Each structure stands twice: as structure tokens, then as C-alpha cells.
Amino acid sequence: MSTNDTPPEEPGAAAQRPKAQPPLEPSAGPVGHEPGPGAEERGQAENGAASPTGYVPGGYAPGGTEQTGPEQTAPEQTGRQRLAAGLWPPRVSRAQLIVAVLLFVLGLGLAIQVRSNSDSSALRGARQEDLVRILDELDGRTKRLEDEKQKLDDQRRELESSSNQAEEARKQTVEKERQLGILAGTVAAQGPGIVLKITDPKGQVQSDKLLDTLQELRAAGAEAIQINGVRIVADSYFSDEEDGVAIDGKKITQPYEFKVIGKPQDLEPALNIPGGVVQSLEKEQAVVSVTRPAKIVVDALRAAKQPDYARSSSS
């Protein structure tokens, strides 16, 4: 027996021996062509390997998502777009809504307060001449009130210190009656003051101008006034008539002469302030003159009126 002889095989051994597999070769393209670029990648895709970008041409990605093209990324938003997206639609909480309502109410209250303060200032748009006149009137009124207070204090001290208080009270009552008679026009009066004469050759001065003059004199501290023989009292009124003006129904003609008792140092400057009575009358082409006699006599009287129903509470 030769050494190269193989031992005989047992029956059935050939059927159990596996057949030899030929070695794997890389897939090739059509006959006569070299494998082109990308062939290796296609081979890897067929074997289940993903491409570097995760794209499998004509198939599915390993995760099971179908890929139809290169991966699309959302465009980056600008700062303005991000701000608009954060503001709209608004996302307001209950606390923010309450704070907004409170701030609105507070701002509305402040606006109303500022508006009321600005509306209540009537002197904001006044002219300089008007402001000067108003300040002068206020100074005069303040001084007169201080003088009146001083007189009342003196009377109180006299009543407290007088040995005969009844007699002192009677004297003060008589003096008070005299003062009230001057104001009511039932008694004559004399004292320092001014005389204002208005000549109106063009006939432009009407009742409203005379009334303004009277009010200016009263504001300056006039205590007794007489115009062309008519005593001026608290209820006097002016009206326009043909060829003149009427006071309390009595017609007067020009020149209009005002006899005024009061402090001349206050009365005359009040008439001559810028934009005052004298300038207003001169604009109407009237001639105005103011003099200061040593003594003014106001002797035009009014009849005392007796009340029909009112009686003194002390009687």
C-alpha cells in the first residue's frame, strides 16, 4: 500500500462534507468597464453601511426614515424676527395684567391732576398790564383790611378798658351809624381825594366805560363817589341813553365828573397804570384829566329806605 493512498471513505461521508465556497470578489460594473467612483460607497450601502452624510441614494436611512434628498436646515432668524416672535402673540399672566391696570389708573389720575392744575390758573395768559393792575389792587385791599383790623382791635381795647363801657359803646354806635350813612349815601361826606373829568367830543364813551372806571376806583379804595350830582351807592346802575348816559335812571351829560373821596396816593396810580382806565378812554379819543384838590365834598344824598318787613333782632 502506498503512503500517498488515502484511506477509503466511509459510505455517506461525502454527503456530510460541506462544499467549498468560492472567495468573495468585489462587484464589478458591466463587462469591459472599470469600477467608477462611488462604486465602493454603493457597495457599502448595499451591505447596510451608511454613507458619511447619512444619505442612502434610492433607499432608506438606517433609522428607517425615507430620504429624498440632502438634509434641509431651517434658516437662521434675525434679531428683529426673534423680538417679534417673543412679543406676538402676547403671553400675559394674571399678575402682569393687574400691574398694567394699576399703572394705567395711576397715569390717568396724574394726567387729570395736571390738567386741573393748569386749567385753574386763570392768570397764565394774562397780559403784563393786567398782572400789574391786579397786584396793585391786591396790595390796596390788603392794606385796607389791615387798617380795618387795627381799628377793630382799638375799639375792643377801649371797650375793655373804659370805666363807662355803656357810654363808650354808645359813641362807637354813633360812629358806626355815620360810617354806614356815608356808604349808603344818606349823609354828606368830605375828605381828601381826586376829581376825574372825562370829556368825550366824539361821543364814543358809553355806560360800560363809565362802569369800568367806577369799579377801578372802588378797587383802589374809594369810600364815597359822586358823578355829575348823582351819589353812587352799592346798587347803582348805568344805562345808555340818547346823547348821554343815565345813572339810576337819571340822565347825565358830558363832561363826566367823578368826585372821589379816598387816599389820592392809591386812587390816581390805579387809573394811570398801563392798560388801565386812562389808556382805555384815550383809545376812544376822550380827554381825561385827574386833579387832587385839598378837600373833596360829596354832598349828593340818597333818601333812606325803610324796610317793609325786616326788623332789628335786638328790638
Image (cartoon, helix red, strand yellow):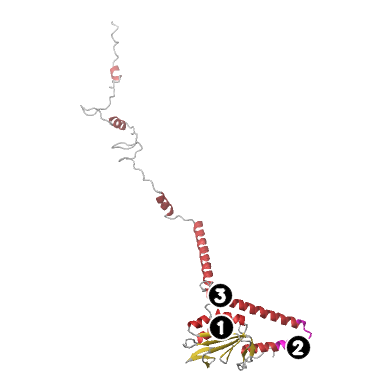
Q: Which span of residues is magenta-colored?
A: 160-173
- Looking at the image, is 31 positioned above or below residue 5? below
Q: What is the x, y in percent for residue 114?
A: 52, 67
Residue 153 figure quarter: bottom right
Viewer-nearest of discs 3 and 1: 3
Residue that numbered label 2 is attached to: 167
| First of labels 1, 2 by sequence position | 2
Q: Mark 3 and mark 2 in contact (Cβ < 8 Å)?
A: no
| First of labels 3, 1 by sequence position | 3
Other residues around mark 2 within 10 Å, as few (<14) / some (14–19) / many (≥20): few
The amino acid beneath tag 1 is: Gln
Horizontally, residue 255 falls left or right of residue 172, namely left
Front residue of this view, candidates 135 and 145: 135
* Real-space Cα separation, disc 3 to disc 1, in angstroms: 16 Å
Q: What is the x, y in percent for residue 127?
A: 51, 74
Q: What is the x, y in percent for residue 48?
A: 33, 32
* Real-space Cα separation, disc 1 to disc 2, in angstroms: 39 Å
Residue 224 figure quarter: bottom right
Q: Is residue 144 magenta?
A: no
Q: Is residue 164 magenta?
A: yes
The amino acid beneath tag 3 is: Val
Viewer-nearest of discs 1 and 2: 1
- Asked if residue 12 shows in the view, the reply is no
Horizontally, residue 137 falls left or right of residue 240, namely right
- Looking at the image, is 126 positioned above or below residue 216? above
Q: Residue at x 58, y 76 (%)?
A: 136
- Label 2: which secondary element: helix
Residue that numbered label 1 is attached to: 215
Residue that numbered label 3 is attached to: 132
Residue 237 figure quarter: bottom right
Q: What is the x, y in percent for residue 79?
A: 41, 49
